[in-house]
């Protein structure tokens, strides 16, 4: 079978005859080609985030923050991203919304495992539905 989708890449829920989901493969490839992100948990509970230096494109002004890959979610959480950066900005925005909604409802910071579970469910939702493109 050819490496192109041949019409089977129009939806994330359409399998090719050989059982491939091209939209999911495209998202995976975007993440693989985007660079390295690392998070290190220290003994005192602090987490250090680091990303590899992005390759700058001629059409983007570097001072605009378009290549920003470490984001502040709330006072006790941050996110480091790789892959397709507009997708990362959508996920960071969703994480900020989840954190602020939790703070408004319960009066405390959202637990990290709850934030991770909610973002994971959100990303999974985009993988399951045919009208949506998986995050990459």
Image (cartoon, rainbow, N blue to C red):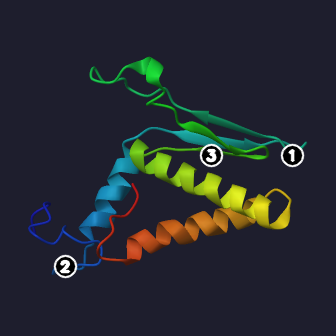
Q: Which residue is mark 3?
A: 79
The image's mark for residue 31 is none
Q: Do labels 3 and 2 touch, CB within 8 Å?
A: no
Judge by depth and name the residue closer to the eye, 17 or 113: 113
The x, y position of residue 89, in whole percent, is 48, 46
Q: Is residue 46 something that shows in the picture?
A: yes
Q: CA distance from mark 3 to mark 2?
A: 36 Å
Question: Which is more foreground, mark 3 or mark 1?
Answer: 3
Q: Residues within 10 Å of mark 1 (few under 14, many from 20)?
A: few
Q: Which residue is mark 1?
A: 45
Question: Which is more foreground, mark 3 or mark 2?
Answer: 3
Q: How many marks?
A: 3
Q: Quadrant of residue 1?
A: bottom left
The earlier-in-sequence mark between 3 and 1 is 1
Q: CA distance from mark 3 to mark 1?
A: 16 Å
Q: Residues within 10 Å of mark 3 (few under 14, many from 20)?
A: some
Label 1: state its secondary structure. loop
The image's mark for residue 18 is 2
Judge by depth and name the residue closer to the eye, 99 or 129: 99
The x, y position of residue 53, in whole percent, is 48, 26
In the rendered view, would you say 103 is above or below 114? above
């Amino acid at each position: 079978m050819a490496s192109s989708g041949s019409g089977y890449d129009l939806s994330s829920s359409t399998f090719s005859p050989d059982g491939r989901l091209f939209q999911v493969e495209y998202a995976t490839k975007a993440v693989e080609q985007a660079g390295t992100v690392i998070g290190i948990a220290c003994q005192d509970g602090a987490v250090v985030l680091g990303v590899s230096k992005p390759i700058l494109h001629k059409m983007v002004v570097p001072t605009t923050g378009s290549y920003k890959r470490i984001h502040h979610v709330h006072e006790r959480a941050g996110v480091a991203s790789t892959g397709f950066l507009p997708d990362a900005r959508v996920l960071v925005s969703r994480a900020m919304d989840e954190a602020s909604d939790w703070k408004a409802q319960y009066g405390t910071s959202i637990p990290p495992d709850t934030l991770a579970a909610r973002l994971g469910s959100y990303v999974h939702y985009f993988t399951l539905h045919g009208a949506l493109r998986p995050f990459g």
